[in-house]
Image: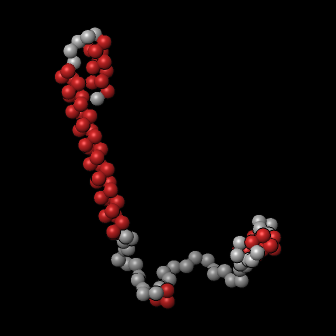
């Protein structure tokens, strides 16, 4: 398409007839536009269908009706015990001021 455009420009400068090339370029432009529209439609259809599939699980993945029925397949390291709540850690690091926030917000829900 780029070479065709250059050829048309060269012919127009030389005052040579280039109507056939212009028709061919218009046809190519229309074909490209139609292909791009088809691509947009196909992409939208694909996205819609992919949303309907959801997450596929491998057959060996155990399933349960709730949290209590889940199975631990493997664990790494020792479980942590006695951790601190996040707001205490933030206060220790000086990353927040709970008392000041409470005064500004009027309650602890800031």
**Residue for point 36% across, 66% down:** 51
Q: How is the image coloured?
A: secondary structure
Image quarter hosting the C terminus: bottom right
| Quadrant in the rendering for residue 17 | top left
The foreground one among 61 and 109 is 109
Residue 14 picture location, percent across and down = 28, 10
- Relative to 11, say whether 66 is above or below: below
Q: Nearer the viewer, residue 49 or 81?
A: 49
Which corner quadrant of the image does residue 10 belong to? top left
Q: Residue furthest front?
A: 106
* Residue for point 26% across, 34% down: 29
* Residue 27 seen in this snapshot: yes
Total of numbered circles in the picture?
A: 0
**Residue positioned 24% across, 37% down in the render:** 30
For this orientation, the residue located farthest to the left is 20
Q: Is residue 92 visible?
A: no
Q: Is residue 71 left or right of residue 21?
A: right
Q: Quadrant of the N terminus?
A: top left
Residue 43 in percent (x, y) is at 32, 54
Camera-side residue of 62 and 95: 95
Q: Residue furthest top?
A: 14
Q: Position of residue 45 (x, y in %)?
A: 30, 58
Residue 67 in picture, x, y percent from top left:
49, 86
**Residue drawn at 27 percent across, 24 percent down:** 4
């Amino acid at each position: 398409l780029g070479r065709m455009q250059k050829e048309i420009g060269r012919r127009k400068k030389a005052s040579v007839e280039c109507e056939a090339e212009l028709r061919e370029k218009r046809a190519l432009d229309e074909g490209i536009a139609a292909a791009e529209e088809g691509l947009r439609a196909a992409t939208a259809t694909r996205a819609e269908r992919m949303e309907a599939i959801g997450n596929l699980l491998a057959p060996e993945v155990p399933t349960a009706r709730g949290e209590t029925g889940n199975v631990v397949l493997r664990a790494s390291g020792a479980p942590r015990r006695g951790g601190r709540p996040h707001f205490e850690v933030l206060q220790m690091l000086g990353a927040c001021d709970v008392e000041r926030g409470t005064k500004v917000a009027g309650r602890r829900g800031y």
